[in-house]
Image (tube, grey):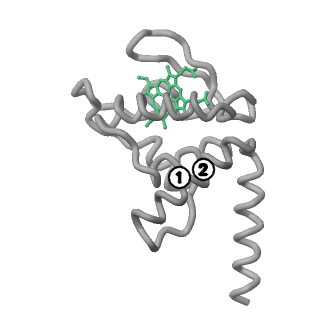
Amino acid sequence: MKKTVCFILLTFTLLNAKEFNTPMKTYMEGLSTEAKAANPSFSGFDAKRGETLFVSKHTGKKGGEMSCTTCHSTNLKNGGQNVNTNKPITALAPSVNPTRLTDVAEVEKWLRRNFNDVFAREGVALEKGDVLTYIINQ
Ligand code: HEC
């Protein structure tokens, strides 16, 4: 029974991971190794935790209340707006915007900036992995 559950979970994880291209998979594996090093009981990234992180409010680097949704909106299939520059942002959801989460350098750059915008610090591996797992499934 336990084995069946493990198998289903593994299949599910692999099906989810299939959405990432090869360089992004390698990036996610690196985050996974880091998360495991930080916490030996780490057992995989979680889209639900990523969603919670995405909508949670924090004091951003400019001192105001911010969340990822401040610029990206709550429905990732819709576009958003950069509140710093007022420029429109196209949808983050890969289902409507297939170029999303395909370029590791781009993803790393924006996660570094955006975590700073919202949390006034960089994200840790667990947070980045969870939030990317959430976004890839949108
Ligand atoms: C101050 C506005 C702002 C906030 C807040 C913000 N972002 Fe962004 N984000 C942007 C902009 C601008 C871009 C780059 C423009 C684009 O890709 O359309 C971007 C791009 C990204 C990308 C790159 C996607 C890709 O592959 O093209 C990811 C991932 C991302 N943001 C995640 C997040 C997460 C997670 C948070 C919360 C921690 C967040 N963002 C908060 C403005 C913001």
| Residue at the spot of label 2 | 28
Residue drawn at (31%, 38%), measured in percent from left and top?
121
Q: How many marks?
A: 2
| Other residues around mark 2 within 10 Å, as few (<14) / some (14–19) / many (≥20) | many
Decide: is 11 above or below 122: below
Direction from residue 122 to residue 17 in the image, left or right: right
Direction from residue 45 to residue 125 in the image, left or right: left
**Residue 47 appears at what percent x and percent y?**
58, 53
Query: Label 1 near label 2: C-beta < 8 Å?
Result: yes
What amino acid type is highlighted by mark number 1? Leu
Residue drawn at (47%, 34%), measured in percent from left and top?
111
The alpha-carbon separation of the residues under discs 2 and 1 comes to: 5 Å
* Marking on residue 6: none
Decide: is 66 above or below 4: above
**Residue 21 appears at what percent x and percent y?**
74, 42
Foreground pick, 7 / 109 = 109
Q: Name the image quarter holding the N terminus.
A: bottom right
**Residue 49 appears at what percent x and percent y?**
49, 55
Q: Residue furthest top?
A: 86
| Residue at the spot of label 1 | 31
Foreground pick, 88 / 6 = 6
What amino acid type is highlighted by mark number 2? Met
SS assignment at label 1 = helix
Residue drawn at (44%, 64%), measured in percent from left and top?
37
Decide: is 21 above or below 1: above
**Residue 70 appears at what percent x and percent y?**
43, 27
Residue drawn at (56%, 52%), measured in percent from left and top?
30
